[in-house]
Amino acid sequence: MSSRSLLLLLTAAGPWLAPVADPIKPYLSSPRRAFTAPELRDAPDEWIDRSLKWADDILDRYPPAVPEHPVRRAALIRLDDVLHIESAPRKPLVQQFYRARIEKAVREIERTRVTEGMRIWKLYNHGFFVRTAGVSFAIDIVPGTNERGFSVDAPALERVADQADAFFISHLHGDHANQAVARLFLARGKPVVAPEGLWAGQAEFSKALLYPKRSTTLVHEIPIQSGRKTLKLVAYPGHQGASPIVNVNLVTTPEGFTILHTGDQSGGDFDWIDRIGAGHKVDVLMPNCWTTDIQRMARGVNPKLILTGHENEMGHTVDHREDYTQTYNHLFGTPYPFLVLGWGESFHYRAATVRERS
């Protein structure tokens, strides 16, 4: 096929066709970055400081909502610019911004009570905290990265553990699973639910973690609050490529709200992903933003809302720090409402605030 014929075919396909990355260009670190502004190796502290303060102010003034205020996207794109400076994880200004955003979220969690729906906080990477009227739980909470200074202090994480009734871990990678965080929950008598074999060589974990059987049909009950209530769980048998195994956790609260957190699910398993929505009424899908065919995943799950995760994981090399801009690109044209949240932001989910399921 000639290049002209290919261009005509792409034009005829309309605006819903996902963009195809260009070959590597001199100004790109990777073809994956073809549709976002190129990163810098460094930048002046004045520009970083002013950018972070502006973005922080905009995100506070215009919190996540459906529909989304357009100025939010401008703020997130500016954050992409800052966080894709190669040296960003080592920048004190970036580290301070990160810690302040998480500290603010922890204070909100401590003082927020929910009477209807769910309040969902996105902390770092793919970590979420979910609260309903009767239960609170955390998923894939980690302190930050191994970079000195880019980590939340232990007292803040202790406060998160104090507020939660249970903790879920999707898989073994360090940006999703952290032993120090797991210990905080176990020390407080909170169930920690993990994929089979996680840290099995260490007795303190192998004897204490809950390893639910991975299945597309089996429903587990996770006891909380001394057994007076339970969280229902389906631990779907996911994978990140061929390995590692990933528990794609479908969690239903006592009030009947259901979330699906995918961890680093990618590369396949559509034989059961395509059928999740047929068997469950999923309120909120929490996928990693770079998963294989996120739009097909959304169709299979058929959620009322999508809240993405894994943007700007600062432990990754700059060419693999998935950015907020790419998330908008991946979800362009989807019929499902979706929100892109920055570090420490939250959304109060009520079914009436998003589309009614057809």
Image (spheres, rainbow, N blue to C red):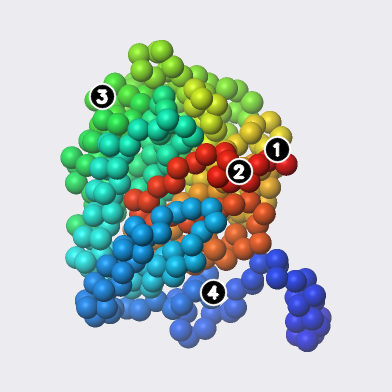
Task: Work out which quarter of the rendered image holds the N terminus and state it.
Answer: bottom right
Q: Amino acid at mark 4?
A: Phe
Task: Work out which quarter of the rendered image holds the C terminus and state it.
Answer: top right
Task: Give the Cα separation between the discs numbered 4 and 3.
Answer: 45 Å
Vertical placement of residue 47 versus 65, above or below = below
- The residue that label 3 is drawn on is 188
Give the image location of residue 321, x and y in percent.
Answer: 42, 63
- The residue that label 2 is drawn on is 304
Q: Residues within 10 Å of mark 1 (few under 14, many from 20)?
A: some
Q: Residue at x 70, y 67 (%)?
A: 17
Q: Which mark is residue 275?
A: 1
Give the image location of residue 141, x and y in percent.
Answer: 35, 42
Q: Residue at x 52, y 83 (%)?
A: 25
**Secondary structure found at label 4:** loop
- The residue that label 4 is drawn on is 35
Give the image location of residue 45, x and y in percent.
Answer: 22, 76
Q: In the depicted view, which residue is nearer to us: 180 or 67?
A: 67
Q: Earlier in the sequence, mark 4 or mark 3?
A: 4
Q: In the depicted view, which residue is nearer to us: 212 or 114?
A: 114
